[in-house]
Amino acid sequence: MFAALAGLALATALTGGAAQAAPPAGHDCITPSGANLNQIYGIKERIVSPPICLEVRAGERWVVLANSWTTAAGPDGAVYPAGYTPELPAPIDDFSAKFHIAKYVIDGGTDQERVVVAGPEALRTFVGADGLPFATFPSPALKPLRPGTHTFAVYVVMSAQHCDGLGVNVELNCLPAGLTEWFPQTPFEVVAKYGTPGRP
């Protein structure tokens, strides 16, 4: 099921997720608990990740990091809605196999709308402190934007229905084949000057 990205990032940090090279000073996206998302996910660009990081600098490339997808730890103990059978035994592998593309829509519905697409190469998987695996898919580095309020939304396309193995509710525990809104259109700010990094 969908899980808060900040919490999962912290869980990864607590379970010893491999830290990447630190981003430039003043660049980090920091959760309220102190987890550094740039280091955890190995992202050198400034991150937009609601609700904690919603500002980027004009002239800089940036990355969208939205919700992650959590699954049962493995086939043992996984539960599914009636009539559903996974293609692969481990739910996280099933999700990865069926993940086709992610679409990142910038300034949707405006004259400046831009759509960026990423394939399975964007997927990154981790294991949280609770022992449950999860996958996330940061956007590619996106082109700089002019100062002002902008928006982003994220969609995923699955090649077939996938269920997470954590419950039997199709609405909560499954993704349908085809296009699904992953994260709704959300505003963020592009500023010429920036205050405290990671804390708008």
Image (cartoon, grey):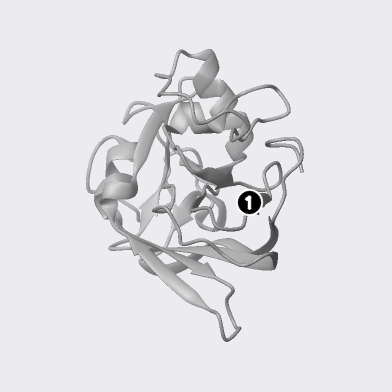
- In the displayed structure image, the side of residue 89 where residue 165 appears, left or right: right
For label 1, the residue is 56
User: Which of the two residues, 79 or 20, is positioned nearer the viewer here?
Assistant: 20
Residue 103's place in the image compared with 77, above or below, is below
Q: Left of 71 or right of it: where is 9?
A: right
> Which residue is at the front of the view, 26 or 7?
26
Which residue is pictured at 70% across the width and 23% down the height? 33
Q: Position of residue 44 (x, y in %)?
A: 45, 37
Which residue is pictured at 57% across the width and 86% down the height? 111
- Classify residue 138 as left or right of residue 169: left
Q: Is residue 62 visible?
A: yes
Tell me the crowding category of disc 1: few under 14, some 14 to 19, or many 20 or more residues within 10 angstroms, Cα based: many
Q: Quadrant of the C terminus?
A: top right
- Residue 50, horizontal then vertical, whole percent: 66, 48
Amino acid found under the numbered disc labelled 1: Val
Q: What SS does tag 1 mark? A: strand
Residue 129 can be seen in this image: no
Taking the image as shown, residue 97 lies to the left or right of residue 77, namely left
Residue at position x 43%, y 53% in the image: 139
Residue sticking out furthest to the bottom: 111
Could you tell me residue 52's position as x and y percent?
Answer: 70, 41
Q: How many marks?
A: 1
Q: Is residue 158 above or below residue 79?
A: below
Residue depicted at x 51% and y 33%: 38
Q: Nearer the viewer, residue 198 or 167?
A: 198
In x, y percent, where is residue 105? 50, 69
